[in-house]
Amino acid sequence: MIEIHEKVCIGCEKCVKVCPVDAIFMEEKIAKLEQELCISCGACVTACPVDAIEPVLKACRANSAEYSGVWVFAEQHGNVCRPTGPELLGKARELADELGEELCAVILGDDVEDLCDELAAYGAEKVYMVQDEKLSNYNTEAYTTALISLISKYKPSVFIMGATHLGRDLAPSVAGHLGLGLTADCTGLSITEVEGCKVLLQTRPAFGGNVMADIICPNTRPQMATVRPHVMQPLEPDHDRKAEIIEEKVKIASDSIKTEILEIMEPEETGEISVEEADVVITGGRGVGGDEGFDRLRELAKLLGGTVGCSRPIVEDDIMPKSHQVGQSGKTISPELDIVCGVSGAVQHRVGIRGSKYIIAINKDPKAPIFEMADFGIVGDINKIVPLLIERLKEKSC
Ligand SMILES: Cc1cc2nc3c(=O)[nH]c(=O)nc-3n(C[C@H](O)[C@H](O)[C@H](O)COP(=O)(O)OP(=O)(O)OC[C@H]3O[C@@H](n4cnc5c(N)ncnc54)[C@H](O)[C@@H]3O)c2cc1C
Ligand code: SF4
Ligand code: SF4
């Protein structure tokens, strides 16, 4: 909500121009607000040159009966869907079924119509789409305005996004403008019942990863969460599945956008597969030792068509770059196979590998906690076992 201080207003009309829903009008050269139309986007607050408009943050106690639908924000970059959209649709399908509500995707961009079929293939029944050249590249203000316009109009009960760089910026902006709760960086989502009402149970590591916290937002709607990439599994795509496409026009005033994109720099092509995308990850911990041990892991990874990940102390010791760190403060991985070498299995590491299909742990300590979650365990010295594995794989490939 906003409040206009009429005595401060100088009648410049800048707020009228930027309001996406025409909630402000002029009366005797003073700005007036139509409260019911306002979607709390905040564009007028930043546009006013004399600070006559003030945001008033209110946690809205929503009437949950008015809200329905599980929404997934489908992130795109260069008009290509990012993996988080399909991943979240997979989980959201379960949530929507349990709630008995529709599963919808939201896509923002310019010329993104073709992506709607892809979202339908991954399970979306409806796709809400806003196309505007101001949305072609991500910027906080334009994306926030578009999303809060859609949310205010269609009132979903659940709204989830990937905890990507974009999601970590956009989700709090949307939640802040609408006065909603937000659980960031979830590793699990499910439905639970509170006082006879079905609510979203949002699970995330807390207190340095030592406990998993279950969080609910019983009073505000939509219930908002961001989810770590690669934690959820997408459904098998079915390209015969079709979705209803709802295209919305949202007024995004250029004046409301405070950032200018000067250059887009794509990440350097290193030819290496990232730990998040690899089917096979060989993860090394302190037990591997230094560069020599990691060279061996690289050789093993190459033979299996995979890549090397590591625990945090390895990054702290400058043996591997941060981009390879797996765990709570690193990447979450979900390969088909994770061979975990010389990693003790601290909870902060384990939280990053839970999505792996098969985990083989190699550790000389039979009591190492990593064995509690491994599918197969080898008790022994890495310096002996890894060279043996390499030798056997080389023999097989001959
Ligand atoms: C807020 C916070 C965030 C964190 N985030 C992360 C994170 O993202 N990722 C992460 O990994 N950690 C993270 N940590 C650190 C985490 O708590 C552990 O300290 C870390 O994971 C331990 O790394 P390690 O298993 O490689 O080392 P260690 O705990 O020292 O374990 C080494 C293991 O190697 C075995 N070993 C030794 N020599 C051999 C050998 N020759 N052959 C076979 N086995 C051998 C040992 O038995 C031991 O089990 C975080 C900590 C905090 C507080
Ligand atoms: S906060 Fe946004 S919707 Fe509300 S009056 Fe201001 S510009 Fe319009
Ligand atoms: S932008 Fe500020 S000063 Fe200008 S009309 Fe609106 S409230 Fe008044």
Image (cartoon, grey):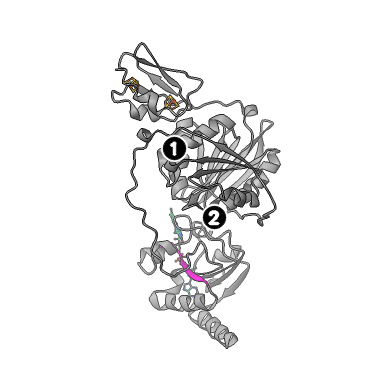
Residue 71, x across and y down, in percent = 59, 41
- Is residue 355 visible to the viewer in this orientation of the structure? yes
- As drawn, the residue found furthest toward the top would be 28
Quadrant of residue 337 in the image?
A: bottom right
- In the rendered image, which quarter contains the N terminus? top left
Q: In what quadrant of the picture does the C terminus appear? A: bottom right
In front: 167, or 349? 167
Numbered circle sitting on residue 173: 1
Mark 2 C-beta closer than 8 Å to ligand 1? no
Please tell me how crowded label 1 is: few (under 14), some (14-19), or many (20+) other residues with Cα within 10 Å: some
The amino acid marked with disc number 1 is Ser
For residue 266, which quarter of the picture? bottom left
- Secondary structure state at the residue bearing disc 1: helix
Of 249 and 286, nearer the camera is: 249
Q: Amino acid at mark 2?
A: Pro
Say which residue appears at 56% left-offset and 54% top-offset: 231
The answer to whether residue 156 is left or right of residue 144 is right
The answer for how far apart the CA atoms under marks 2 and 1 are is 22 Å
- What is the secondary structure assignment of the residue under circle 2? loop
Query: Dot 2 corresponds to which residue?
Result: 83
From this view, report whether residue 303 is shown above or below residue 103.
Answer: below
Give the magenta-colored segment's residue range.
306-312
- The spot of residue 225 in percent (x, y) is 53, 42
Of the numbered discs in the image, which one, if any, rests on residue 100?
none
Instruction: State if disc 1 and disc 2 touch (CB < 8 Å).
Output: no
Residue 52: x and y in percent read 33, 21
